Image: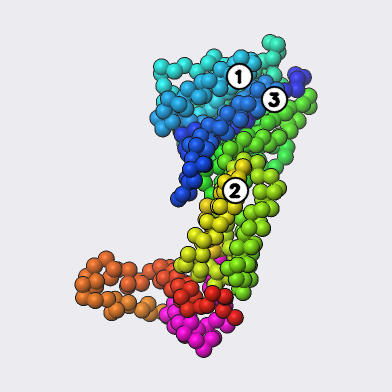
Amino acid sequence: MPIRPFSFLHASDLHLDRPPTGVEEVPEHLRPLFVDCAYRSAQRIFDAALAGPVDFVVLAGDVVDPDLAGPRGCVFLSEQAARLAAKNIRVYWAGGRADHADIWPPGLDLPANVHLFPRGQVGRFTHRRDNEPLAALVGLSRQDRKRIRPAEFVPEDDMPFTIAVCYGLAEGETLAGHGIHYWALGGEHERRNVGAAPLMAHYPGTPQGRRPREAGPRGCTSVQVDEQARVRQTFVSTDALRWLNERILVTPHTSRDQLERQLRERAAALWGAGLGPDALVHWSVAGSPWLAAKLRWSSLENDLLARLRNEFGSRRPALWSVAIEPHGDLEPPESWSEQESLLGEMLRSLKKLAASEEPPDLRVLLGERQSRGSLAGAAALDDPAERRRTFEDAALLAMDMLSHEESPK
C-alpha cells in the first residue's frame, strides 16, 4: 500500500506532578518558574504541535499523576487537548506508572480527540487523513518499567505504516524484526535511539529537567515519514528551566582569586552564547586538592556563589549558580606529605592510619560519657569504606586549617 507523507510529535515523561529538586536555596525571582516549569514545558509541546503542522501527537507514559497533580494537572491536559481538537489533531496516549487510565478522575472527561491505550492488552487505532489511512497505532498502558515484549505488538498487514506506543525498558535486538516501523517509547528521561538503523525505536526523554543530573536541553521529538517509509527525527526544545553542569579545571597552585576569575569568565561565556531558558548551573572544580579543601571546609564556596549570583543570577535569562564543589583530586600531592611542617606531619600520619590493616580505635580518645553513646560506634571505624572517607575528610580539613591563603608549593 502506498504511503502518504505525514508527521507526528512524540513526547513522554512530562511529569506535571513533579517540581524540580536538588536546590537548597531558590531565589525569589525564580520561584514562580520552579512551580510552573513542568507546565510551561508541556505547553510548548502542544504549541509545537499546533505550529507543526502535525497529523497527531503520541504521548508515551508518565504524563501526569492525577492524585499528585490535583485538578490543575487534569484540567491543563484537557484544555491542551481541546486546543488540538480545534485543529483536528488527535492524541494517542499510552499510560505509564503515573498515568494509567484507571486513576483518571471520572468527573473530568477528556476531549474526543484523545485516545487512551488500554492496560493489560494491546489496543489498536487507525489514523486517517481525508478518510485515507495514514498509519496504524498499536499500544499498551503499563504500570511498571519492565521489559517490553515486542511479540505483543503485531503490525497491521493492510496498513502502510505501524507505530508501536509503549512505556518500559527496551533493547534493540529484541525490537528488531517485528514489522513495526517506529517504536514510540516512554519511561526514560534521557533522549536516545534504541538499537541501530534501520530500526527506529526512540525515547524522547523528559521535556523538562528536574535535577542536576538531567542537564542540558530537554524536549520532544518531531517525526516525519516520507513516501518510502523513511523516518526523520527533529529535536524540539521545550524546557523552561535548564540545568547545566560545568567543570572548571585548575592547577594545584591556582589561587582563590584565579578560581573566581575562571568561574566568572566561564559564566560570562555561557550567558553571552545565549542560554535559551533560565539556567541553573552546578560547578565542579578539578585539579587542586588545596581548593577542594577550601571549598569543602571554608567559606570559599559561599563567597564565590554570592558573587556569581549577584552578577549573573538576576539577568534575563538568569544564570543561577547552585553549588561549587570539588571534583575528584581529593588526595594531596606526595610533595605535600614530604614537607617538614605541621601539615606534612599531619598528612603522613593520616596516610599511615588509612593504610593500616588494624583500624585505629578512636574510642580511647572519648570521655567516659561519650564512650557510652552513639559517638562510640562512629569512632570504632570498623567499616573500611567509612574509614577511608574519614581520613580523606581529615586530610582536607588539615589542608584547609594548616595551609596559607595561597596553595602550598
Residue wearing tag 1: 84
* Left or right: residue 365 compared with residue 189: left
Sooner in the amino-acid sequence: mark 1 or mark 3: 3
Residue designated by label 2: 319
> Can residue 235 be seen from the camera position used here?
yes
Write the residue at 71% across / 34% down.
Answer: 233
The amino acid on which the numbered mark 3 sits, given as a three-letter code, is Gly
Label 3 to label 2: alpha-carbon separation: 30 Å
Q: Position of residue 285 (x, y in %)?
A: 58, 63
Residue at 66 percent across and 53 percent down: it is 268
Dominant SS type (magenta): helix
Which portion, as a residue range, is magenta? Answer: 328-354
Q: Nearer the viewer, residue 266 or 89?
A: 266
Residue 79 position (above or below residue 359): above
Tags 1 and 2 touching, CB below 8 Å? no
Residue 155, given in percent of the width and then of the height, sits at 64, 25
Q: Are marks 3 and 2 in contact (CB under 8 Å)?
A: no
Quadrant of residue 164 within the rendered picture? top right
Magenta highlight on residue 397: no
Give whichever of discs 1 and 2 has the lower sequence position.
1
Q: Secondary structure at mark 2?
A: strand
Front residue of 280/394: it is 280
On residue 172, the disc is none
**Pointer 3: what residue?**
52
Name the outermost residue toward the bottom: 340
The residue at the point 62 percent across, 42 percent down is 317
